[in-house]
Amino acid sequence: MQIKAFKEWTVVCQALAQGNQSLIIRKGGISEGKAGFSFEAKKFLLFPTYFHAQNDKIKSAQVELRAEHQLGDKIELTHLAELSYATSIADWEKVQNLDSFHIWSEETIRERFDWQKKSDKSNSLIQGLIHVAIVRIYKLPKPFIMTYERSHHGCKSWIDIDGVPELLIKTAEPVMSDQMHESKIAELQAILD
């Protein structure tokens, strides 16, 4: 089967996989196209990247410094995300209130919030907006091993992955209990709504 995969820093994928984070915060990739960024899929694989230096972009922990994936590299995809809630935030105070729910530094989030992009319609700058999703993470029963191809390269958020056995998706196990996940959603929605 074909499924979407979401490209995200390795350190963030690890935090999601360990149940230490339930948020994805995105300004959008450079290659998102005219429509801009959106959460395109209800279920998607996490695709860990090394594209940007990450140590100075998070609150703590050390990230293994590695070059980004090269054509032909074998990549293990180990976790599935399911979208529980998504919104866009233009209020910096709300964004700051999410601080205890993620591992990014305040400077990194501020940089994403203040990122500017020219609007195709009005030629004005779009500023002060980030996209936020609450996700539930599932561990695949075994890694899906794929080969890195040219179509996976570049500063884009979403890629299509072919040949994923449907059974891997159906038998993935949540990393967080139902009760913990519902509690996390309630806490986050209280801030976001």
Image (cartoon, rainbow, N blue to C red):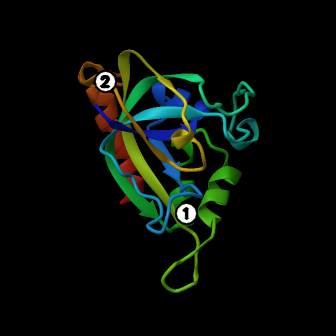
Quarter location, residue 159: top left
Cα–Cα span, label 2 and label 1: 30 Å
Residue 72 lies, with reference to residue 96, above or below; the image says: above
Q: Residue 158, labelled with which disc?
A: none
Image quarter (top left, top right, bottom left or bottom right) of the N terminus = top left
Q: Position of residue 30 (x, y in %)?
A: 60, 58
Where is mark 1, residue-wise?
Answer: 93
In this rendered view, identify the residue nearer to me: 24 or 29.
29
Q: Amino acid at mark 2?
A: Ser
Q: How many marks?
A: 2
Q: Do residues under tags 2 and 1 come within 8 Å of each other at their CB atoms?
A: no
Secondary structure beneath label 2: loop
Q: Position of residue 117 (x, y in %)?
A: 60, 71
Residue 21 lies, with reference to residue 91, above or below; the image says: above
Q: Residue 177, labelled with which disc?
A: 2
Mark nearer the N terminus (2 vs 1): 1
Residue 148 lies, with reference to residue 153, above or below; the image says: above
Q: Amino acid at mark 1?
A: Glu
On the question of residue 18 being in view, the answer is: no
Outermost residue toward the top in this view = 142
